[in-house]
Amino acid sequence: MEYVWIVVLLLLGIAMVGRPDLLWKIEHFWDVKNGEPSELYIALMRVMGTFCIIGSIIFLIALFI
């Protein structure tokens, strides 16, 4: 069961690094019409996505040790 959360964290991290604009549109679907994310939002999403990927790899290694 622990593997599911690690995979979810890894996929979320990949999405945050690869497509932060798509995640912004999903997050603000009802709030903003034809809006775009700021450069700061995109940069912070990529940094957090990198931390999610690194964290999921560390958790995966910790499960096998």
Image: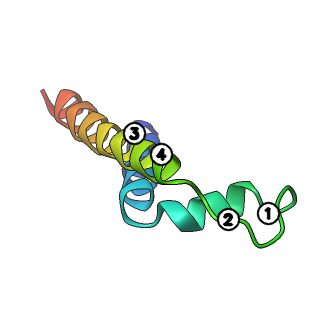
Q: Residue 56 location, x and y as percent?
A: 31, 39
Callout 3: SS: helix
Marks counted in the figure total: 4
Residue at mark 2 = 25
Q: Residue 8 location, x and y as percent?
A: 47, 50
Cβ atoms under marks 1 and 3 closer than 8 Å: no
The amino acid type found where label 2 is placed reads: Lys
Horizontal relation, residue 56 to residue 48: left or right: left
Closer mark to the observer between disc 2 and disc 4: 4
Question: Which residue is found at the position 24% from the left and 39% from the top?
Answer: 54
Q: Earlier in the sequence, mark 2 or mark 4?
A: 2
Q: Is residue 12 above or below residue 21?
A: above
Residue at mark 4 = 40
Q: Earlier in the sequence, mark 2 or mark 3?
A: 2
The amino acid type found where label 1 is placed reads: Phe
The image quadrant that residue 65 belongs to is top left
Cα distance between the residues tagged 2 and 3: 17 Å
Residue at mark 1 = 29
- Label 4 packing within 10 angstroms: few (<14), some (14-19), many (20+): few
Cα distance between the residues tagged 1 and 2: 6 Å
The image quadrant that residue 16 belongs to is bottom left
Q: Earlier in the sequence, mark 1 or mark 3?
A: 1
